[in-house]
Amino acid sequence: MRLLHRSTRTLMLAVFGLLAVTTIARAQTDPLPSWNEGTSKKAIVDFVQATTTSGTSKFVPPGERIATFDQDGTLWVEHPVYPQLMYILDRVPAVVKAKPELAKVEPFKTVMSGNREAIAKLSLGDLEKLAVATLSGMSVEQFAAEAKVWLETAKDPRWKRPYTELTYLPMQEVLAYLRANGYRTYIVTGGGQDFVRQYAEKVYGIPPEQVIGTAGATKFGYDKSGRPFLTKEPKMTLNDNNAGKAEGIHLMIGRRPYAAFGNTAGDQQMLEYTGAGDGARLMMLVLHDDATREYAYGPATGLPDSKVGTFSQKLYDEAKTKGWTVVSMKNDWCASIGAAPWSESESLEHCRIRRGPIHKHNATYRADGRASVWRAVMGEEVQMRVRILIAATAMTVAFATTFAHAEMTAEELAEIAQNPVGNLISVSFQNNTNLKFGPEKGTQNILNIQPVIPISINDDWNIITRTILPVIWQPALGPDEVALAASVISNSMRFSRRPNQVNGSWAQAPSCRPPRRATLNSAMTTGAWDRRSSCCTSTKAVLGFTEYSSTTFGRSPATSKVARITTL
């Protein structure tokens, strides 16, 4: 009875400790850590909660949850010129090389001169001529290959970084938060549809089929070997700007969005179309009012006027009248004052004052590709939860061990230490490191926390419980995946007979794994359940210094058996 009492108390302490840690971890979750507390952040969170809470009048069925995002100026930098325009200008020399006669024809002559002031004065008609020459006349595969090479090598003139790294981390968090709650996210851009499709999935987690943009015609044909292919034609089929955005949404999606995000008058009709629907709707406009960390342009609210990404006062007034949310980069997005928005070493003094410490990668409102986005999102707060989890687990086991063995003699401890299925509380930490893991070639660490707690039934028999809690840190494999999480927790029980006079013992151990989903941050999980289940039954016998074990695994539709002999 003495052993039974101690073991029961031990089990209760362990359960209490794990429940307490789980409560702490959930309480600290923030799906939008790069947003300052305020009306903009609250509008996003309130909208998601209202439309995903079943049984309410604002609930939106999962199949109807659509959110659309403009790209230039909403998801990534658009100043001083649109990145795709830089691609067009950079492609001109190759076009002229293929057709030398164009070197003396405007606007190609001006571009080849390298005179930036003259290039900046090119008319819209001139830019259209350049676009036709550089974006058509080749197969879709050739275009994709050329665009990918440029995206990998071209760098923004101010930030000296690839354009695909100059995305806004707060908006990346919004994309992830919406997807975690069942929303499908679409890019609806005035930029070239084929161009944006080359990087949208890697940079934003948005697959090509969910990119709607200005589209050119294609022509079907066969090459010399008879292989079919498509050629990009110099003809526009969809001008996805202004009213064209609403038209493109209907053409490509067939559903009215429940949330829409933009930053210019070119997004006005998309937001109006979204707001005209029934139920809860979220319309947001990003205002570039931070000249220190990025750029400031409007001319809304007295900001400098701009031909690129114009946010007019008329649009600003409409937003206020209709209840749209205007997001201030300066006030709503968390970053330190006086530093570049993509600085890796920047500290978060501004955010520390408002919200307390945040991981240094959250110091910027950018996301340098897929992996860094998730390192930032799963930053210091989640790491703190893991540290709390590990510390609390270790402390619980330490207290339990102290209570269970406080009255044992050295001889008793030595006796049970010789029995691998005996009455000894233990906790082991096993760390596995895998190098060059995933598409980012990063490092994966899996820490298995494995407490073993015996419960004595009587003088002859024990029930031995073993829990395995894997804590995984790895480079994110995709935007809908976490980089730091507690993985599937498994538990097994063994019915073990205590050693007899010939130093022998045996154990019978049933163990099952039910369908499950486990993560430290529920806001960042993909929402997918593993519905597979498995069970195993193992028999272990110990005679002298040799352990004999046999395990039968059952998992639909197959079963397998493993036998092992180990010298202790």
Image (cartoon, rainbow, N blue to C red):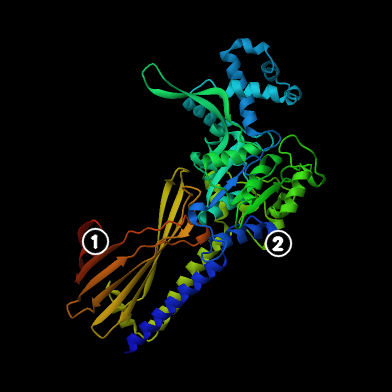
Q: Tell me: 44 left or right of 118.
A: left
Q: Viewed as shown, does residue 567 lie left or right of 87?
A: left
Q: Is residue 32 above or below residue 477?
A: below
Q: Is residue 173 above or below residue 131?
A: below
Q: In the image shown, does 412 or 517 lie closer to the viewer?
A: 517
Q: Residues within 10 Å of mark 2 (few under 14, many from 20)?
A: few
Q: Which mark is residue 212?
A: none
Q: Is residue 478 left or right of residue 507?
A: right
Where does label 2 land, which residue? 354
Q: Please tell me which of labels 1 and 2 falls first in the chain.
A: 2
Q: Percent position (x, y) of residue 372?
A: 55, 48
Q: Quadrant of the C terminus?
A: bottom left
Find residue 164 and report its image quarter.
top right
Measure the C-alpha gap from mark 1 to mark 2. Answer: 53 Å
Q: Residue furthest right?
A: 302
Image coords of residue 470 (percent x, y): 41, 61
For the point 39% across and 16% down, the residue is 224
Q: Quadrant of the N terminus?
A: bottom left
Res. 300 in view: yes
CB under 8 Å between discs 1 and 2: no
Residue at figure coordinates x 19%, y 70% from the top left: 541
Kindly identify which numbered label has been placed on residue 553.
1
Element type where label 1 sits in the image: strand
Q: Tell me where residue 427 appears, x and y as whole percent.
A: 39, 70
- Front-most of residues 229 and 275: 275
